């Protein structure tokens, strides 16, 4: 069996943090996720994560990835000692003792396969010599077990293994540009700067306009199509996808979301949502998780969507909250409209069908449905379904008290 072991206990020695290095992020992607991407091409069948005792943040991150792996706790210390109970003696082990953000997945795959085919007992992926090692090792499981090894230095490991009559083979085929062992906060900053520059250069070469690279942050998994313009101060992170001919204006953050073609987004925050073609959003709008904005729709300033499907060519111009809602095509949402979705215990859905008109400052108390072509008068609080083509109005009668101001002033 092919196994990978990630030594999280080894990665925090020089990194000044109470949290594991693996939970820290580079351009919005956790180091743990980057490591997983690096090793997945090597045909790993089982993964063991060796973490410090009681590291809740690291355990939570593992659970978030939905991985089936063995989490093995070790006290934070200089050495690690594996038992044969941890693996079968014939297993091939890929051991990650350091994090190299620029190490290619293909380099790890080739190193692992070559070590297996050549029958090495122990090997390290290195550049030029063993002093320039990557912290990525190959072991035959039998030769790793019951040996207390300090993985901070390849030279120390080599000397230790010689006491067991095992040579640590240095492969000496790692591209110099891939060697960058991230151990300190300063390394993290340098790595982020270098990766950012590589990402922006790649996107510019593909036909994306980035007006101010120094203030723009784009993650390694983000995809952007040709002729899109990115303004200063934009953050695009996670697995976001941006279509062609879009304009993304400054101070916009888009995280794990999909944006179609010919969209214009101004100074807004979008998370885990989908935006179709020819949509305008902002300024200062927020799309919270599980929101969908259909083609041709308009989400204006200070509008918030949460778990809402906002229909084609519908409009919410300003100052509205639409939560847990299903909104049809051609709907008009007036200023100050609120879908009142939470009763203090459960969330409830609001349904607004095609071409309905919701007047300004209306409250829709969910669960409630406004049928096709219905009209809700401004200032109404709606607690019952509104029939198709009906006008719903819910206000107290206006009373004008004559000379009230004059009488108040006399007092």
Image (cartoon, rainbow, N blue to C red):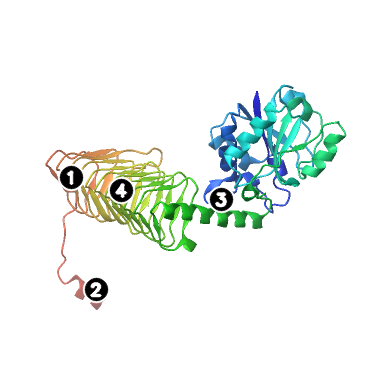
Compute the Cα span from label 3 to label 2. Answer: 65 Å
Tell me the element at label 1.
loop
Does label 3 or label 1 sit earlier along the sequence? 3
Mark 3 and mark 1 in contact? Answer it, CB < 8 Å: no
Residue at the spot of label 4: 261
For image coordinates 71% across by 39% down, the residue present is: 171
Compute the Cα span from label 1 to label 2. Answer: 43 Å
Residue at the spot of label 2: 408
Q: Quadrant of the N terminus?
A: top right
Does label 3 or label 2 sit earlier along the sequence? 3
Does label 2 or label 4 sit earlier along the sequence? 4
Does residue 255 lie above or below 234 as drawn?
above
Q: At which x and y percent is residue 7? A: 69, 39
Residue at the spot of label 3: 26
Name which quarter of the figure residue 91 lies in.
top right
Compute the Cα span from label 4 to label 3. Answer: 28 Å
């Amino acid at each position: 069996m092919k196994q990978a072991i990630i030594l999280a206990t080894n990665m925090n020695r020089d990194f000044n943090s109470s949290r594991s290095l693996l939970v820290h992020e580079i351009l919005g992607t956790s180091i743990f996720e980057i490591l997983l991407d690096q090793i997945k091409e090597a045909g790993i069948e089982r993964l063991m994560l060796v973490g410090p005792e009681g590291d809740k943040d690291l355990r939570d991150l593992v659970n978030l990835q939905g991985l089936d792996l063995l989490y093995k706790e070790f006290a934070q210390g200089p050495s690690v000692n594996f038992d044969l109970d941890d693996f079968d003696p014939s297993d091939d082990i890929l051991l990650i003792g350091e994090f190299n953000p620029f190490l290619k997945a293909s380099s790890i795959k080739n190193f692992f396969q070559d070590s297996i085919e050549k029958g090495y007992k122990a090997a390290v992926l290195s550049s030029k010599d063993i002093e320039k090692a990557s912290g990525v090792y190959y072991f035959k499981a039998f030769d790793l077990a019951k040996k207390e090894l300090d993985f901070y230095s390849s030279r120390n490991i080599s000397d230790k293994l010689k006491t067991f009559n095992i040579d640590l083979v240095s492969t000496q085929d790692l591209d110099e540009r891939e060697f960058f062992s991230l151990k300190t906060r300063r390394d993290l900053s340098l790595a982020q700067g270098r990766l950012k520059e590589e990402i922006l250069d790649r996107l510019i070469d593909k036909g994306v306009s980035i007006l101010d690279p120094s203030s723009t942050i784009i993650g390694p998994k983000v995809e952007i199509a040709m002729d899109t313009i990115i303004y200063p101060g934009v953050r695009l992170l996670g697995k976001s996808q941006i279509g062609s001919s879009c304009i993304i204006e400054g101070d916009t953050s888009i995280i794990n979301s999909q944006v179609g073609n010919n969209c214009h987004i101004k100074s807004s925050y979008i998370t885990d949502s989908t935006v179709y073609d020819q949509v305008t959003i902002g300024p200062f709008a927020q799309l919270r998780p599980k929101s969908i904005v259909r083609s041709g729709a308009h989400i204006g300033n200070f509008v918030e969507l949460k778990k809402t499907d906002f229909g084609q060519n519908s409009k919410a111009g300003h100052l509205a909250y639409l939560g847990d809602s299903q909104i049809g095509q051609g709907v008009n949402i007036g200023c100050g409209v609120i879908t009142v979705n939470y009763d203090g215990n459960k969330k409830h859905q609001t349904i607004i069908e095609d071409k309905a008109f919701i007047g300004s400052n209306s409250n829709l108390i969910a669960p409630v449905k406004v049928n096709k072509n219905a009209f809700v008068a401004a200032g109404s609080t709606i607690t019952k379904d509104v029939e198709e083509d009906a006008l719903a109005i819910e206000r107290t009668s206006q009373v004008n008290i004559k000379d009230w101001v004059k009488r108040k002033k006399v007092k």
